[in-house]
Every structure is written in C-alpha cells, then in structure tokens.
Image (spheres, rainbow, N blue to C red):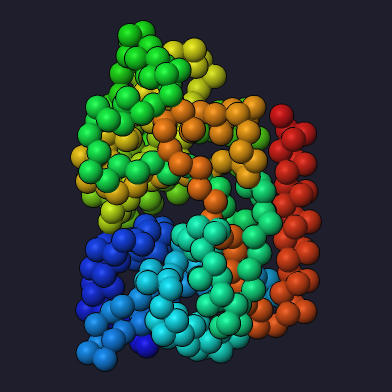
Amino acid sequence: MRFVTDEKSEAEYTSFLESHERCNFQQSIEWSKVKTSWKHEVILAEDSSGKIIGALMVWIRKIPIFGNIMYSARGPVCDVHNMEVLKQINEGVQELAKKYNAIVIRIEPDIKSDDQSFRNIMLDLGYQIKDDAKNFREEIQPRYVFRLDTKGKTEEELFSNLHSKTRYNVRLATKKGVTIKEGTREDLKDFHKIMVTTGIRDGFITRPLSYFEKMYDCLGTKHMKLLMAYFEDKPISGVIVIMYGNKTWYLYGASSNEHRNLMPNYLLQWEMIKIALENKSDIYDLRGVPGIADNSNGLYRFKKGFGAEYTEFIGEVYMEFKPLRYRTYKFAEKVFRNVRALKLKFKK
C-alpha cells in the first residue's frame, strides 16, 4: 500500500482510474481540484511488482467543534470482491485516520445493494453499513439512480428502447423548433440564471456561478460539456454532462418556467445519450431519483422513460473512530438539514 505523493504517482493513478471498469469522475484528480474546500489523499493498493490494483480517493474536511471527517464518493476502484486488495485500502484508511485524527470515514460506493460478497468483506474489516436512506437529504450521493447500458449499442437501438411517450416528446421538441447547442464557459451565465429559477421552483439550494466556472476550468472540454436548449434564439434549458473513463453522467440540469410544454429536457437527455455513444461509454448515468419506485413521481417517470435500469446502491459504508463525537455530529447534521429544508419550503 502507498499513497499518491507526486506528479508521477498522480499520473499513474489517473491512468489506472481512466482504464478501470469501476471508474468514477468523483475519484479523479480533476474533480478534487473542483472540491478545494476538502483536502484529498489517494490510497493505492499494489501487487508485488508495484502495479496499482486498487485505489480510494479520500476527502478530508474539518468540521468546527467536532473535528475532521473523511469521505469518499463512489470508491473504491478495484475488484471489490478481493479481500486482499480491500485490506490494503483499509490499511491506508487507518493510516489517514491517525494522521488527521479523524472521527469517521464515510464511503458511498458505486456498488449495488444486493452485492452480499462486498457487504461481508466490509463488515469483516470492521465497517458498518447504513442502507435505509430513501430521499436525497439523507446521504451526500444519491442512493437510487437510473443507469442506461450503452455498451455496444447503436443510436437506433437506444431510441427504439425509449418509452413511446418519451420518443414522442423528443420528436415534439425538434418539431416545435427547439435546438441544442454546445455551450462555452461564457454560456454558463445563462445556465446559472436558469438554474436559480429551477432551484426556486423545485425547492433546492443552488451553487454559485463561480462553482460551475471552476468545474469548466478543472475538467475541461475533455470531461465536461454544457448543452443549452434554445427556442427562438432564447435559452430555455441546459444540462451539464460529464465524460470520464467508461461512463457518461448527467450531472446538473436546469429549466426555465417558460416553454416547458416544448419538452426541451427530453431532447437534452437524448443528446446526452448520443454523447455517451460518441465517447464509447459503457454506461450513461441519469443520476438520482427518490428511493420509492413509483410512476406517480415525475422525476422517476421522466428518467425511466429513457429505457434505463433503476439502480439501488449499497448506501453508506462507514467506520467510526470517535463514536460519541461522530454520533453527536450526525445529530447536529440532521437538525441542520431539516431546518434548511423548512427554510426552502417557506421561501416557496
């Protein structure tokens, strides 16, 4: 086991990540440069020759009063059924916990909830698993997503696999004059204005424009695209799509209150699926939905219409280093989230 410590090991890690089937952009060096409010460390598991066979990017952040927490989004990147590799990664976790005097490590893996083998290994290593979250406020990453298998598929196959109503709405947007253009960094201003409108309408806190500009600067056009939908030369919707390794993600979406009847969001999703095909992605990830598989929920129904698989991840895998302090922090965190949700509700 070793850590990424210099430019050489950083490049070695990036090469490993981009070529691995469990690649995730949130484990990348590029993404860590976006998340500058966190310090990051990368644990590397290796074979006898020093070749990387597993990795986990860990973010560290100091929480006033409580101390440092360690967190990892969508790791580890390895054969998740190999106990020896996971032991090496856990050795690195323990070393970082001592280095930073951490109260906990929280990991939200890209692993399905029914993977009993991974569960057993992590429990044997001393971790606990929280897998009862049902809504977006209970975890950092969405536990329930829709994922579309794009590996080896053609555009015609994927379009025919759309729900009939979804195909109709994609065609309707085009017929009614909606056009899609790839945006520049300057176009992020229009996207952000629409995002603020979306946040007010749907009751969530929006990030500042500077955050999206930093994303654009750190990820570059190799890993990030901004797509904007226009009607009569006016921007009415937009999405941010991420391409990394063997996957493509729908990360952010925004829509104005005007011209929603023209179905621009359906056309934008279809354009992102085509980007996934162009990039030879194995998976197009439509990201989060509530943890209740119910067609009465509009977001669930919208994403399901693209022929994707409803996917439930394992949830949060964690280890408490200072149990009493961590549980006090969790209680305070829950209170804060509930108060914030109430404030948003009253603002609406």
Left or right: 320 in relation to 232: right
In the rendered view, would you say 233 is above or below 243? above
Residue 256: x %, y % from top left: 50, 22
User: Residue 193: in sight, yes or no?
Assistant: no
* Rendered residue at 54%/19% (across/down): 257
Picture quarter containing residue 326? bottom right
Seen as rendered, the residue at the extreme top is 176
In the image, residue 89 sits, relative to residue 294, either above or below, namely below
Residue 96's x, y, as percent?
50, 84
325 vs 92, left or right, is: right
- 38, 288: nearer the viewer: 288
Measured along the vertical axis of the image, is residue 330 above or below residue 184?
Answer: below
Q: Residue at x 36, y 62 (%)?
A: 22
Q: Nearer the viewer, residue 137 or 306?
A: 306
- Expressed as whole percent of the image width and height from the top left, the position of residue 279 reads 22, 45
Give x and y (percent) for residue 130.
66, 64
Q: Quadrant of the C terminus?
A: top right
How many labels were placed on the picture? 0
Residue at image location 38% in from the left, 51% down from the top: 214
- Examine the image and state in which quarter residue 272 appears: top left
Q: Quadrant of the N terminus?
A: bottom left
* Residue 341 seen in this snapshot: yes
Residue at the image point whose x is 58% and y is 82% from the top: 124
